[in-house]
């Protein structure tokens, strides 16, 4: 099967090794006999709903976010139609913030968001930096931990009733207070975790691939056959341990 991935703004939103996430998706798809076809979707490019099975948007600093925010608005309707049609989407950090209703940057710059996730973000004085450990339950009864690194000034507030990606075991998360990190709406996931995220959390990479495959086939999402993942588990354990050493929320 060919899995079509639309990588939004790879030239602007790509700090913290976000490209590594794409590399992981690509290898894990190939190990299951699937080809990942990645298309860059940049400034001025159209999003065509139905064309891609998975969208990815990475992290960036306020300056880069400013450069893409207005352009992303032009793509908002098509992206909404794409996810309504079952496409999956992973947004990291700066990209995550722009999926909400808006982001007010560190210097008071107001950036519009596309409202795909029910949240808003305002930058605070102090950056929230360090290793993070979350507990997630994307599928009922399947609790998994997600380990990563955060570095953001933005405080993200979820609307009442919005589903977070996970519960913070260690680290700051969305705003350093709520105890939650990220946001999930169906097959759309936003998170502050990078570093990159997927190499040390292969279960999430596989979850995204299975959602993308479901979009491609028009069927239900089916869990992929497990891989040995010895190094990946080790990377997860080291990262989780660093987050635990940091202690609870602070
Ligand atoms: N500029 C945003 C913030 O500081 C996002 C940073 C990032 O993508 N790492 O909150």
Image (cartoon, rainbow, N blue to C red):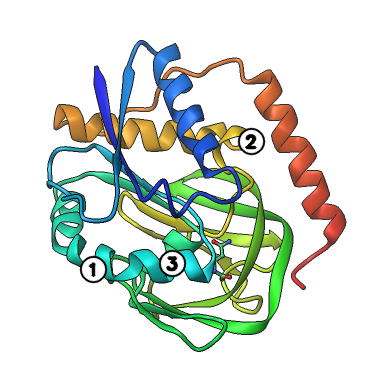
204 left or right of 34 in image: right
Residue under circle 1?
Answer: 73
Residue 36: image quadrant is top left
Give the x, y percent position of residue 33.
35, 10
* Labels 2 & 3 near each other (Cβ < 8 A): no
Q: Can residue 99 be seen in this view?
A: no
Which one is nearer the viewer's eye here, 14 or 125?
14
Q: Is residue 66 above or below residue 123?
A: above
Residue under circle 3?
Answer: 65
Q: In this view, does 232 lie above or below 18?
A: above
Sequence-wise first label, 2 or 3: 3
Q: Distance between the residues labelled 1 and 2?
A: 32 Å
Residue under circle 2?
Answer: 200
Q: Distance between the residues labelled 2 and 3?
A: 26 Å
202 left or right of 49 in image: right
* Element type where label 3 sits in the image: helix
200 left or right of 62 in image: right
Give the x, y percent position of residue 131.
74, 55
User: As drawn, which residue projects farthest toward the bottom?
Assistant: 108
User: As drawn, which residue projects farthest toward the right?
Assistant: 245
Around disc 2, counting alpha carbons within 10 Å, would you say few (fewer than 14), some (14 to 19), or many (20 or more)? many
Sequence-wise first label, 1 or 2: 1
- Single out the mark in the foreground, 2 or 3: 3
Residue 101: image quadrant is bottom left
* Element type where label 2 sits in the image: helix
Which one is nearer the viewer's eye here, 76 or 64?
64
Which one is nearer the viewer's eye here, 89 or 140?
89
Which one is nearer the viewer's eye here, 135 or 52?
52
């Amino acid at each position: 099967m060919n899995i079509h991935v639309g990588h939004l703004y790879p030239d602007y939103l790509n700090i913290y090794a976000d490209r590594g996430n794409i590399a992981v998706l690509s290898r894990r798809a190939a190990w299951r006999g699937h080809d990942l076809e990645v298309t860059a979707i940049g400034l001025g490019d159209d999003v065509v709903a139905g064309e891609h099975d998975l969208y990815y948007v990475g992290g960036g600093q306020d300056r880069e976010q400013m450069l893409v925010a207005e352009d992303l608005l032009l793509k908002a309707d098509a992206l909404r139609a794409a996810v309504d049609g079952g496409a999956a989407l992973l947004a990291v950090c700066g990209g995550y913030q722009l999926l909400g209703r808006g982001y007010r940057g560190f210097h008071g710059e107001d950036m519009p968001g596309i409202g795909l996730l029910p949240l808003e973000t305002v930058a605070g004085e102090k950056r929230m930096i360090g290793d993070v450990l979350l507990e997630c339950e994307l599928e009922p009864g399947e609790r998994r931990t997600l380990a990563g690194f955060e570095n953001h000034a933005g405080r993200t507030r979820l609307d009442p009733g919005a589903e977070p990606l996970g519960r913070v075991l260690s680290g700051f998360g969305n705003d350093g207070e709520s105890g939650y990190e990220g946001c999930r709406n169906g097959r759309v996931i936003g998170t502050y975790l990078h570093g990159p995220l997927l190499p040390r959390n292969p279960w999430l990479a596989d979850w995204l691939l299975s959602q993308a495959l479901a979009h491609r086939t028009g069927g239900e999402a089916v869990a992929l056959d497990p891989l040995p993942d010895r190094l990946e588990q080790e990377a997860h354990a080291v990262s989780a341990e660093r987050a635990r050493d940091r202690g609870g929320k602070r």
